[in-house]
Amino acid sequence: MSTGAMSLATPSTLVGLLWPSRDDARFAALRAIVLMVAGSALLTISAKVQVPLPYVPMTMQTMVVLLIGASYGLRLGGATVALYLAEGAMGMPVFANTPPMAAGISYFFSPTGGFLFGFLAAALVMGFMAERGWDRSLGRVIVMMTIGHAVIFAVGLSWLSAIMPFAKAWTVGAAPFIAATLVKTALAAALMQAAWTVTRRKNASR
Ligand SMILES: O=C(O)CCCC[C@@H]1SC[C@@H]2NC(=O)N[C@@H]21
């Protein structure tokens, strides 16, 4: 593997097994672009599936971020979330509060900016763990998704508590999301398990 796109492919990941790359630079580049665009589109949709709350809305983004990291792997997952952030930085209305807020660099300084950087960190951590097999058993995938959520909240809350007192940051940025985060962790783990079951069956019948 010699090109950048080929180095994004990781055969040990779920997506690497379901849609393997090839030792062909053009195919590898096209595959990486398709997966990154599809992943960033899914993230945009997940931002719009939301319950509006003061300062920080409830969305489906964390679940999609964790699934992208876990199924794409470290580099492709990280590149996909980086593309999503770049789209928002360039003014595309991909984030939860765009509209009413305008997208662009200034959005990252809004109350949810820290969560967005947390998404990138969590996708990298999920990809790193998935490439080491943490996504393949139910117990480990639950631990993995819990760590991913913890990373998102650690970065998001650190940012929020830089612009408001920590008690308020907790009240608006963590407390309302605890139950939903448990549900999203369980759902993400169940989806990874189901995807691995299908992948193993598919590979066994080859
Ligand atoms: O502005 C954005 O697009 C990011 C929104 C971040 C929402 C955070 S992520 C963690 C927590 N769980 C949710 O459902 N909402 C918040």
Image (cartoon, helix red, strand yellow):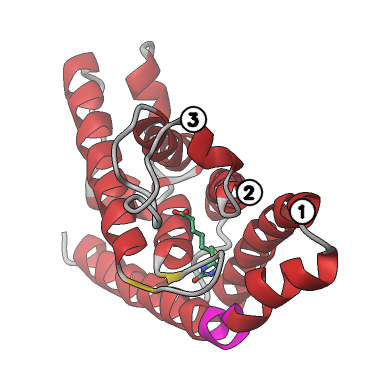
Q: Secondary structure at mark 1?
A: helix
Mark identifier at residue 74: none
Q: Which residues are magenta?
A: 177-182
How many labels were placed on the picture?
3
- The single residue placed furthest to the top in the displayed view is 2
Residue at (58%, 62%) from the top-left corner?
Answer: 134
Q: Cα distance, mark 3 to mark 2?
A: 13 Å
Q: Secondary structure at mark 2?
A: helix
Q: Cα distance, mark 3 to mark 1?
A: 19 Å
Q: Is residue 181 magenta?
A: yes
Whether residues under marks 2 and 1 lie with C-beta atoms below 8 angstroms apart, the answer is yes
Q: Amino acid at mark 2?
A: Gly
Q: Is residue 81 above or below residue 61?
A: above
Q: Is residue 119 magenta?
A: no
Q: Is residue 92 above or below residue 116?
A: above
Mark identifier at residue 105: 3
Q: Which residue carries the number 2 mark?
A: 114
Q: Cα distance, mark 2 to mark 1?
A: 7 Å
In the displayed structure image, the side of residue 174 where residue 78 appears, left or right = left
Q: Which residue carries the number 1 mark?
A: 158
Q: Residue 200 at x, y = what percent?
A: 31, 67
Q: Nearer the viewer, residue 3 or 82?
A: 82
Prevalent SS, magenta region: helix
